[in-house]
Amino acid sequence: MARVNRAALSGRMEVVRARASFAPAVLERFERHLCEAPDEELFRMSPLRYGAAAGLSEPLAIDLFLCAAHAGILDFAWGVLCPACSAFLSTASSLKSLANQRCPLCQLEAPVEDDSVEIAFTVSPSVRKLCYHEPWKLSVADDYLRLHYSPSAQLPSFIRDAIATGALSQQSIGPYQAHTFRAELAEGELGINAPAHHGWTHVHLAEGAPSGAELHLVEGKLIPEEVTVAKGAFALTVHNRTDGQTPVVLMKSPLPEDRGEGDYPEIIRAPYLTAKRLVTSNTFRELFRSQSIPGERGLEFKSLTVLFTDLKGSTELYERVGDFSAFALVREHFDVLREAVATRGGAVVKTIGDAVMASFAEAAAAMDSAAAMRREVKKVGGGGLELKIGLHQGPCIAVESNERLDYFGQTVNIAARVQGVAGADEIACTRSVYGDPRVRSVAEAAGLSAREDRAILKGVGGEVGIYRLA
């Protein structure tokens, strides 16, 4: 029987309803899902997969989950994914705390990059109690996969089988307590694992080694990472140095003993919400302004699409219709641009005078937004307004500037320069954007014709190939 706090859920759903962004049927289905779905479907949920099942667009599904998190219905975690085994290595609750991780099982570095960070959502315990809120009560065979691995990972059968049969002994250790695991084995590769903390100590067997070892669970890590004990009978004592009860398991390693460096199975991942996709969401930027970029290094994205707009002839507009009327038209034009960005999963980074800078995880969404901007701005004030739009795609660094997320790098500079050479009522983009077949499909569907050109961009050496769309 699900332990649902219906009063808390109902009250917090009213906060989501107040945004008026979601149809009543969408919210009714979502609330019913939170009440009736099995526990495993409400732990580390993907808004993309929920949206696909519920018939929602990806931007709308992401907005729904973010609004629910802001209302206290869901909690979200940032998981750095191991590139080899897809372990969900971090449960940090904030963007700022993200950092490169080392997978304790594979012993590989898991860097914080575009698609290596998964954001997953779990229903809040104040709304509904899940078994995963009390990991010390879970069994390894049934729940290890969900605790240790990405919920998007389609793990090979041999890993699943090894975990299902590999647990030799399991114990829930209380805060600041200890437990001794005893076993008798002549061969094999073992591990002491704290799945709720992603702690793993490799246990090697060797003739003449000590018959026991001491391990310590500290700040989510098992120390040391490797121990060697004698073949035959041995004892491993684990000290829980944390203030929480935690399950610890002695188990056979799920990875092959004879694996070489880089010899890991290919793991397929279902669609999931990445850090890049999240920080380019207008709703995330609006609701979670306190989320800041990690430290001095920022957050590196291998590929981000940046869009700049400028209002053609805005100075003449003020002279022609007067300050008050012109200001009203400019504000209405900003509303149109924000709508075109937000409904396509992008984010308005900032406005600069009459210009807008926006970011998108995918170039096709940026082109779709640009086409909508060009079309809808013509309707503002009965017509007469014309936009110049520029797009470029490439690597970026996300940083915190004036307590807001911002982007720096040559990609931003080029996007701004491309907007500068665009004509009135024209979208200009680089080959990195128009080379994407999905971008061309979007442009054709919007009735845009492309003309190839070359332009000299300030600060960029030589001529740059661009496409002009109108």
Image (cartoon, grey):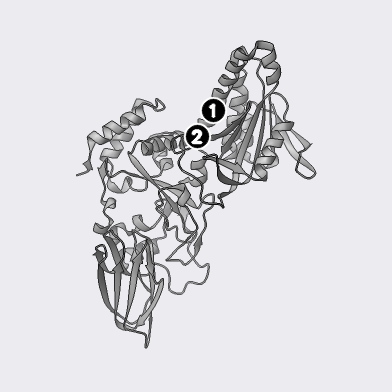
Residue 13 to residue 212: above or below: above
Q: Which element carries disc 2, helix, strand or loop? A: helix
Pick the front one: 139 or 306: 306
Question: Could you tell whether 198 is left or right of 113 in the image?
Answer: left
Where does the C terminus fall, quadrant-wise? top right
Question: Could you tell whether 8 is left or right of 57 in the image?
Answer: left
Name the residue beneath numbered marker 2: 282
- Residue visible at 58% across and 26% down? 372
Pick the front one: 232 or 202: 202
Q: Which element carries disc 1, helix, strand or loop? A: helix
Residue 51 to residue 156: above or below: above
Pick the front one: 296 or 267: 296
Q: Quadrant of residue 437?
A: top right
Looking at the picture, how far across and down is residue 297, in whole percent? Answer: 56, 52
Name the residue beneath numbered marker 1: 338
Question: Could you tell whether 468 is left or right of 284 in the image?
Answer: right
Residue located farthest toward the bottom when viewing the structure as drawn:
208
- N-terminal of the pair, mark 1 or mark 2, is 2
Q: CA distance from mark 1 to mark 2?
A: 9 Å
Looking at the picture, how far across and down is residue 49, in whole percent? Answer: 41, 42
Q: Indicate the amino acid at tag 1.
A: Arg
Pick the front one: 61 or 296: 296
Where does the N terminus fall, quadrant-wise? top left
Cβ–Cβ under 8 Å for marks 1 and 2: yes
Density class for disc 1 (Cα within 10 Å; few <14, some 14-19, many ≥20) is: some
Asked whether residue 28 appears in the rendered view, the answer is no
Asked whether residue 378 appears in the rendered view, the answer is yes
Q: Indicate the amino acid at tag 2.
A: Asn
Looking at the picture, how far across and down is residue 209, in whole percent? Answer: 37, 85
